[in-house]
Amino acid sequence: MQSIYFGGGTPSTLKIEHIESVLNAVYSNFTVDKNAEITFESNPVSLKIDYLKGLKSLGINRLSIGVQSFMDSKLKILGRLHDSQKAFKAVKNAQDTGFKNISIDLIYGLNETEKEIEYELESAVSLDIQHISIYMLSIEKNTKFEKMAALKQLKVSNNDEMADFYLFISKYLEDEGFEHYEISNFAKKGFKSSHNCSYWLGYDYRSFGVSASSFVEGIRFKNSDSLDFYLNGKNIVETAEKLEKEERMREEFVLLLRTAEGVDVGKFNKKYKIDIEKYYKNELSKFKKLNLIKKEKRHITLNSAEAMVVSNSIFSEFI
């Protein structure tokens, strides 16, 4: 096991002794690499010095902090518990405690100006952190945000503005020494997320907890969202689906295409015993003519940040 990740919820609500119990169970049941990346996800309000010291004493070596924004007005709209000063303080506390691999999450698309986007990025870079994940605001059905948008209580950037922001963000962070190594992720040299890369490379992963999803030996399964079922050990696995070889191949192709490295044609063909360029002949030809996909040496990749802007449309044709 090369990575352990506490997240997908708010694990910082747990006490240090609870986190220690989980880690002990992991070490007792799995072989963990000596230099494994162990990430802990947290909101800023939880990261007090004593708590951080406890996390570090357990061997946790990477933090993912849900900053979301450095603008108090945006944080209020997003319903976050912290303000911008608490976000700055959380990162400083982590650095003072000795954490040297820190990531933050940011969200854009709330009708910002380019100047406000620039302020968000300046603030992030000023923290001297190693990794930044930036996500476009998505309005999901049957959510508070959907209701707010319908009532015009929430102003969302339009598609053209989102695209312009994305290109601005990509250039700004690359100029500041961050590698744009996946559509929504930027890292300083040597600090790509091992956990995230495992997903994109198609590795198996095991997840534990309510609603957790896993992928093991070609089978995708999801745990029940019932806490009672989970605690009682009854009907923990809610769904299980075995992916056929072709479906798995298509999914992995798209996941790899999300990354800057892209699809290593030789390795991919060997793994799936296929000529992937022949299999996707029409799709690849189409997007090469549109200058959205390229092949250099043995790697097929998206051609630019502009291609990443319309990546969902591209991926839909490969699935």
Image: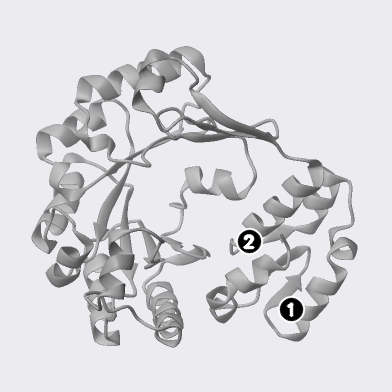
**Marks 2 and 1, how far apart at CA:** 17 Å
Mark 1 residue type? Phe
Instruction: Answer above or below: position of 202 versus 133.
Output: above
SS of the residue under disc 2:
loop
Answer yes or no: is residue 47 visible.
no
Q: Position of residue 15 (x, y in %)?
A: 19, 26
The quadrant holding residue 318 is: bottom right
Task: Pick the residue in front: 20 or 209.
Answer: 209
SS of the residue under disc 1:
helix
For image coordinates 22% across by 41% down, the residue present is 98
Report the mark closest to the observer, 2 or 1. Answer: 1
Answer yes or no: is residue 106 visible.
yes
Q: Are marks 2 and 1 in contact (CB under 8 Å)?
A: no
Residue underneath mark 1: 287
Task: Pick the residue in front: 60 or 214.
Answer: 214
Mark 2 residue type? Glu
For image coordinates 48% across by 31% down, the residue present is 207
Give the number of the disc on residue 261: 2
Horizontal side of 38 relative to 58 (left or right) equals: right
Quarter holding the C terminus?
bottom right
Q: Position of residue 167 (x, y in %)?
A: 45, 81
Q: Position of residue 164 (x, y in %)?
A: 43, 85
Horizontal side of 273 relative to 11 (left or right) equals: right
Precedes in sequence: disc 2 or disc 1: 2
